[in-house]
Amino acid sequence: MRKKFFWIIFFKIFFFITYSISLANKEEKIIRFYNWSEYVSSEVLNQFTKETGIKVICSTYSSNESMYSKIKIYKKESYDLIVPSTYFIEKMSKEGMLKKIDKTKLTQFRNIDINFLNKSFDPKNNFSIPYIWGATGIGVNTDFINPNRINSWANLWDQKYRKKLLLIDDAREIFQMALLKLGCSGNTSDPKLIKMAYEELKKIVPNIMAFNSDNPANPFIQGEAEIGMIWNGSASIARRFGVPIEFIWPKEGGIFWMDSLAIPSTSKNVNESLRLIDFLLRPDIAEKIIKKIGYPTANFAAKKLLPKRITNNKILYPDKEIINNGEWQKDVGKANILYENYFQKLKSVR
């Protein structure tokens, strides 16, 4: 009897250990999604989890620089999906920080507008999937300023806007604004031109009220900013809530950018990340996201589902003339360090 009892206990313990290992192997899959704030609602991510069983843990950043630094330095912080902007795709792919995307696993890739594919920063879209696009222009609080008198980046240098000016907290965007004002390309890597832009930006310092890239509409909503740089999507959302803000396309050209879905080379859940990308490319999901966040979509199929009040909005979907007059951001290689150094000097001047 004792021997029989021993074997009963042994098999129970064996079964328990085997069952525990089995459960461990079936642990809930998790994707760590590092994204701009408010770019995907919790409602959408919960739907993804409900449909796939894959949980999404979201962290947010307010600049490409902070996202890049964290992934570059803190490699143990293994993110699975990120949303870099235009030139950071090129920069990160050159540095081996992004995985090549297997587009054969993306059944919804066909929904992307071909006008947003094969851009210079990723010619074959090997490392990025177009997601959200937009532009930086001039925001004006119409309670204080007549928008008909604003048509140029140069207007932001006017002394009457002392301590009333909002700037995007982004080195490349601010220097691109100054370079366009000077009649140069905002994608230059020429040290002389970059320094010239810095000297020009020093003149605007007395006007600066704040730098903001988390949500540049907030200072307008709170009545703190009267004029400044703003993203078109951010301005559109503010207008939706009754904020008296006008978005103006400067005559020198707007600053165009695209935020794309990308997989870091350190990702431990590549297949799960591809499933999330495909989910976000679904027309019904992309439509839901765009209605929530207010930015233009690169998803042609989703755009067709949007109401005319959105697709006919020239702030969000400008005509070809405005787009052609603008400038898309590109990688400037090592010159980016120069931009950043001058940007920090500019901030210290304040």
Image: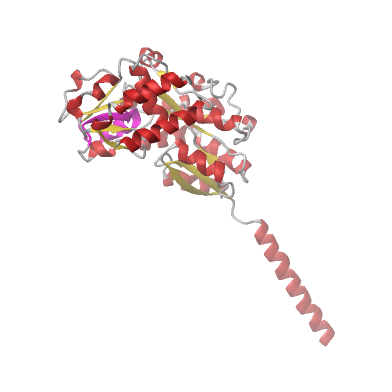
Could you tell whether 93 is left or right of 167 in the image? Answer: right
Residue situated in front as seen by the camera: 219 or 191: 191
Left or right: 56 in relation to 324? right
Question: What colour scheme has been applied to the protein in the rendered image?
Answer: secondary structure
| Residue 246 vs residue 241, the one in the foreground | 246
Which of the image's four quarters has the C terminus?
top left
Residue 79 in the image: above or below residue 117: below
Residue 236 within the magenta-colored segment of the rendering: yes
Residue located at (34% from left, 38% from top): 348
- What percent of the width, then of the height, locates residue 251? 30, 15
Task: State the extent of the magenta-drawn residues as a range.
Answer: 225-244
x and y, in percent, of residue 205 in the image: 28, 31
Query: In terms of image quadrants, where is residue 91?
Result: top right
Residue 275, quarter of the rendered image: top right
Is residue 316 in view?
no
Q: Is residue 343 left or right of residue 16?
A: left
Does residue 256 belong to the magenta stretch? no
**Which residue shows up at 29% across the image and 31% down it?**
235
Quadrant placement of the N terminus: bottom right
Residue 121 quadrant: top right
- Residue 83 placement (x, y as % from top left): 49, 36
Toward the top, the furthest residue is 321
Q: Nearer the viewer, residue 311 or 94?
A: 94
Counting from the top left corner in percent of width and height, residue 285 is at 46, 36
Q: Is residue 145 visible?
A: yes
**What number of labels is visible?**
0
